[in-house]
Amino acid sequence: MKNKMVFLMLFIISVLVAGCIGDSTENSKQQTELSGVLKLDGSTTVYPIAKTASEEFMKLHPAVTIDVQQSSTGEGLVKFLAGETDISDATRAPKDNEYAEAKQKGMKLHMIVISNDAVGVIVHPSNPLSDLTTAQLKAIYFDGTVTDWSQITNGTKKGKIKIYNTDPKISGTAELFNTKIAGSADKQYVAGTTIIHPTPLMIPTIRDDPDGIAYTPVNWINSDVKVVKVNGVAPTQQTILDTSYLLSRKMYMITDGAPVGLEREFISFILSEKGQNIVQKEGFIPVT
């Protein structure tokens, strides 16, 4: 009888201890579960990755809310420096004046590469042109010495070239194009160009204009338009990764200092295998 009582006491104690451990584990899980709010804004190019990744991240962490907006790289940095967002999506590095403003406000701009990307030059599918040199693009967009398609198609196509661009003051896409083609982000376009914003609108614009030429991030490009090689090189995964394609670039998320807390967890998710699969599904080239 005595042995039975001892066994019963030990059993009850073990159950109580197990219950305490279970409660402790559950409490620990609740304490470590991510929660909070993140706000992102910036590049329209980065937006699809940020948006899809945020939706998947919130499924994994229901107590987290991520608000993802899009404007442009420049406009996103304005909001970020004003303290309105936690992460700024960008397709270029911050400019000197943006670094200076950040320093003045006690902020340190920190860039994390989340994807590889490129800017493609596009024309109407009926256009016989298949390749343009840097010099020809500069002559069209900046010098005004090439104004008719006959000048660069050996007469197989005639008509005034209709030029479409976006604003390099706010667009990382335009800044890259201007820098690589004209040598300066601030180089003025020829008179008569048409500003299109945001850059995805370049696709329907060129689709409907047989005389048009434009540039846009390659992930937006579809069969409605024709991609033109630049200096004989097409924007493929290989040429973008090895940067033999002139208009190759990186995509970034910018934080104030190295990311911590919820910012770090979200960006780490994007850089994980699952996150980089999202990058690929959205039409971009993973970094890992």
Image (tube, rainbow, N blue to C red):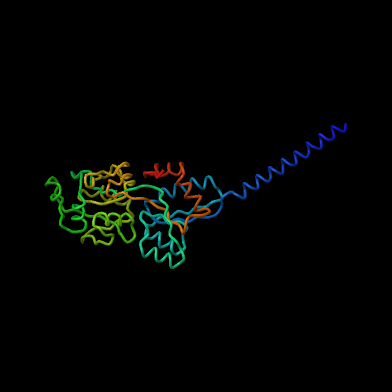
Q: Position of residue 256 (x, y in %)?
A: 46, 59
Which residue is at a point 14% across and 47% down the rendered structure image? 153
Q: Position of residue 139 (x, y in %)?
A: 18, 55
Which residue is at a point 23% across and 58% down the rendered structure image? 193
Number of dots carrying numbers: 0
Residue 2 against residue 261 in the figure, above or below = above
- Single out the residue that lies furthest toward the right: 1
Q: Position of residue 199 (x, y in %)?
A: 32, 53
Compared across the picture, whether 11 is left or right of 219 comes to right
Q: Position of residue 229 (x, y in %)?
A: 23, 45
Q: Nearer the viewer, residue 28 or 40?
A: 28
Quarter of the image with the C terminus is top left
Which residue is at a point 44% across and 64% down the rendered structure image? 82
Q: Nearer the viewer, residue 39 or 232?
A: 232
- Single out the residue that lies furthest toward the left: 155
Quarter of the image with the N terminus is top right
Compared across the picture, whether 199 is left or right of 40 comes to left
- Single out the residue that lies furthest toward the bottom: 104
Corner quadrant of residue 188: bottom left
Corner quadrant of residue 145: bottom left
